[in-house]
Amino acid sequence: MFEPVQSQQTYRRIAVEPLTGALGAEIRGADLARPLDDETKEEIFAAFRDYLVIYFPDQPLSHAAHLAFARHFGPVITLPQIFPVPECPDLQMIKREADAKGRVVGETWHTDSTFLERPPYCVVMRAIDVPPSGGDTAFSNLYLAYDALSPKMKELLSGLRAVHSAAHLFGSKQDPNLNRSFKFPEIKADGDREITHPVVCTHPVSGRKFVYVNNVFVHRFDGMTEEESAPLLQFLFAHCSKVDFTCRIRWHKDQLLIWDNRATYHRAIADYDGCARHMVRATVEGPRPS
């Protein structure tokens, strides 16, 4: 069991409606198309710190306004595997046409691009075109996943580092069934390049500990073989995605959402065959996990 999220923040400029006891909140009262005053920004930052996933309905933003808002959270970067928005290449698009076949991008629980030395701190995503139903995104709170572990397991994990790479995404182990809404760098070595991050990290803003492994990019523990690592990794992947730790976001046109890409998992729900889904995202760089 865990205590539901209870923000200690007093909100005067925005209205915050928690979504579940685990994480997530709807934010109203801010027009993101206009410059934000300092108090409004600080309240948005506080809600993001406490709820990890926050979303703003009814925000018909231009690409420039979307990008300007994202930059309040840090420097915007682009990821090598995602197509840019042609008229605004600092933004990238997640787009699936109605006649697309094959797997949906992001349908496995994961944290974005942990194969980077400085993986994204957060992602600011806007809905351009969504199915009439379906196409939700689920999120899981990795603070809660860590808190729910036994003291002995926490002790064991505290000394481990995990090996991350993009080998299955655009390296030598690339899945041939991946939908072509991803782009793939030509140099396989870029995907196979490995980096290690701690299995337990401390969040740079909240100071809370969270589990930092995911099924897409983590292959083994540093100093161990994949076979030796597999039992504990499979336990952690399943543990971190327990329904008790999750929320599920239903998208609407012009909705803008920010998720903390350190202390959460997320996954796309692949239940909208025959419908188009078009999202635009800004990716904000963070410090190296520690």
Image (cartoon, rainbow, N blue to C red):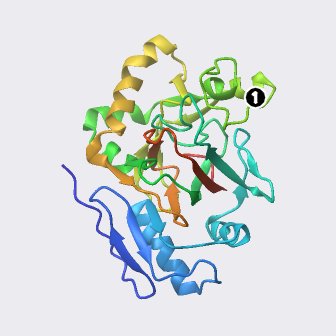
Query: Can the viewer see residue 156?
Result: no
The quarter of the displayed image where residue 270 is located: top left
Q: Residue at x 54, y 19 (%)?
A: 223
The quarter of the displayed image where residue 196 is located: top right
Query: Can the viewer see residue 28?
Result: yes
Q: Residue at x 51, y 16 (%)?
A: 224
Q: Residue at x 59, y 77 (%)?
A: 32
Q: Nearer the viewer, residue 278 or 112?
A: 278
Amino acid identity at mark 1: Asp
Which residue is the extreme one toward the left?
1
Q: Position of residue 207 (x, y in %)?
A: 44, 58
Q: Nearer the viewer, residue 232 or 77?
A: 77
Q: Secondary structure at mark 1?
A: helix
State left or right for residue 70 relative to residue 43. Answer: right
Q: Position of residue 56 (x, y in %)?
A: 48, 70
Q: Position of residue 77 (x, y in %)?
A: 72, 53
Q: Nearer the viewer, residue 269 or 100?
A: 100
Q: Label 1: few (<14), some or many (≥20) within 10 Å?
A: some
Q: Position of residue 198 (x, y in %)?
A: 51, 37
Q: Is residue 21 above or below residue 227?
A: below
Q: Residue at x 46, y 47 (%)?
A: 135
State left or right for residue 252 relative to residue 149. Answer: right
Q: Circle 1 sits on which residue?
A: 190
Q: Is residue 149 above or below residue 208?
A: above
Q: Nearer the viewer, residue 93 or 14?
A: 93
Q: Give the total of numbered labels.
A: 1
